[in-house]
Image (cartoon, grey):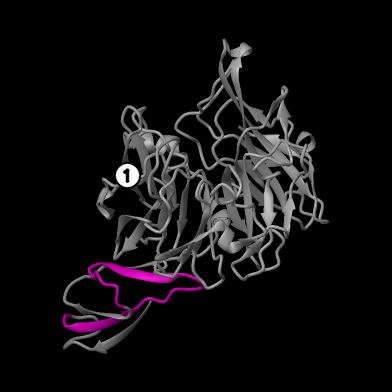
Amino acid sequence: MSEKVIKVGLATDYNSGTIVELTAEPTDDWEFIEWIGDITSTENPVQITIDEAKTVKARFHKPINYLVNSHYYKNEMNPYFDLIKITKNHDIGNPKYGGYDTGVAYADFNGDGYIDINLMLNAGVDGDYCEHFMLINNGDDTFTMNNDLITNTNFNTYMSRKTIVGDFNGDKIADVVRIAGGHDWLRKSNIMLSDNGTFTFKEIDEVPFSQYHGFASGDIDNDGDLDLFFGSPNSGFAINDGNANFTWFKVTDKISNYFEDNDQRDGPYGVQTSEIFDINSDGNLDLILGGSYKDESYDYNLTSPTILWGNGSGNFDYDNKLELWELGDKPYHNGVKVGNNDDFSFADIDQDGFMDAVVQYIYQIDNDPNNNGNTTMYFQYQVMKNNGNSSFTDVTSEWLPDSMKNCTVVWTILKDVDNNGMLDLTEYASTTSKGGSGPDINCSEKAWRWEWNGSKFDKIN
């Protein structure tokens, strides 16, 4: 901060009547926010008249770039908060609510440089309505509730399965998009848009009424704003005009040589997860699809997690793709084929210059005799090494021996969460409850976490 005397008072420096001009001078990539104390202003420079002792402070922050694809935001920019502890401190960590992991958004919502938490929580006996909470970071990772920042809080997303943060209206402030629709809950997806210091919800009318399992964001058409891709059913692209107004394109409009639409379905059955990310570092965003995979060549499904290579045009060619494994390589557990692929993340795990993949699966065993005839759910991480020659190799047994869990795993994160220089494989954060089903369940409230030691992942939690 520098100062310059504009007008000297009748006596010596800074006596009564002296007018001082204060200039906030941020360094590097910091930006000035406001003056606080005896001046409350966002002007810079600002003048103050000295008529008594004055205390003035300049507030700065590092702006966050929210114009990044959803894969990058998930793995690089999201913090690693203990969500259970935080929500319990605010009496919203009780069994009334669910959906913490799928309905949570982390961003600097009030513009003070600290990461806040926005929660959409399923509530009621059957999760038939939602409540919204805004937890503002006090600067020390403690939080104060301020729901006055949200308007239209009665807006329901109903069992949102995924939440994405990004700047969709071009004001450099975080917005939040949630897909609507749990199982048999058909709703419109919605966006929580920044509006002069507050946030308001609106439905994305252009996106079909559906129960989407997954979606992703990125600058698909390479025009400088964030677009959206939605998985099945009713799969397609919501292309942004830069002001959060979207135009809908069916997948067959933007993916050539895709599955034939003989029975009015848009693309393959069961595209339950997707991400947008430049996997081969050629400067073009790629589209990664996953979900339910085929057992026979004639099945109307993807073969495996599939990368559609981008060329920067906003269009893709299904013949220009890479499949992580071939037909017949679908993972098994105790003779049961993998069910859904709910998430995946990419990172250069072994530091050989190529992006490796971690894929998250669910196995469902109905009428399990080892669980008194009830349904048992298993969750697995599969680690696929990128060979650098348009192929991947399953290295799960070598890199992640402890890959199968009875307890619910929601997301897949590859990030150095403790800043010790070692890559971690984990979830977003600790969850409300590590639910599961089956015999010998030993679930905890801590997120599963492993740390890369240079040759394999060591179990931390």
**Quarter of the C terminus within the rendering:** top right
Mark 1 element type:
loop
Which residue: 63% across, 33% down? 339
Q: Residue furthest front?
A: 262
Q: Quadrant of residue 180?
A: top left
Q: What residue span does the magenta drawing correspond to? A: 16-43
Q: Quadrant of residue 404?
A: top right
Which residue: 20% across, 78% down? 50
Q: Is 297 or 433 nearer to us in this picture?
A: 297
Judge whether residue 27 is colored magenta: yes
Q: Is 137 or 172 nearer to us in this picture?
A: 172
**Quarter of the N terminus within the rendering:** bottom left
Q: Is residue 447 visible?
A: yes
Q: Which residue is mark 1?
A: 156
Which residue: 63% across, 45% down? 290
Q: Is 300 or 16 nearer to us in this picture?
A: 300
Q: Position of residue 178 (x, y in %)?
A: 42, 49
Judge whether residue 441 is colored magenta: no
Q: Position of residue 292 (x, y in %)?
A: 62, 39
Q: Is residue 133 above or below residue 31?
A: above
Q: Position of residue 225 (x, y in %)?
A: 49, 68
Q: Is residue 131 left or right of residue 341?
A: left
Q: Judge the density around disc 1: few (<14), some (14-19), many (≥20) Cα neighbours within 10 Å.
A: many
Q: Is residue 114 visible?
A: no
Q: Is residue 97 left or right of residue 301?
A: left
Q: Quadrant of residue 442?
A: top right
**Residue type, numbered disc 1:** Asn
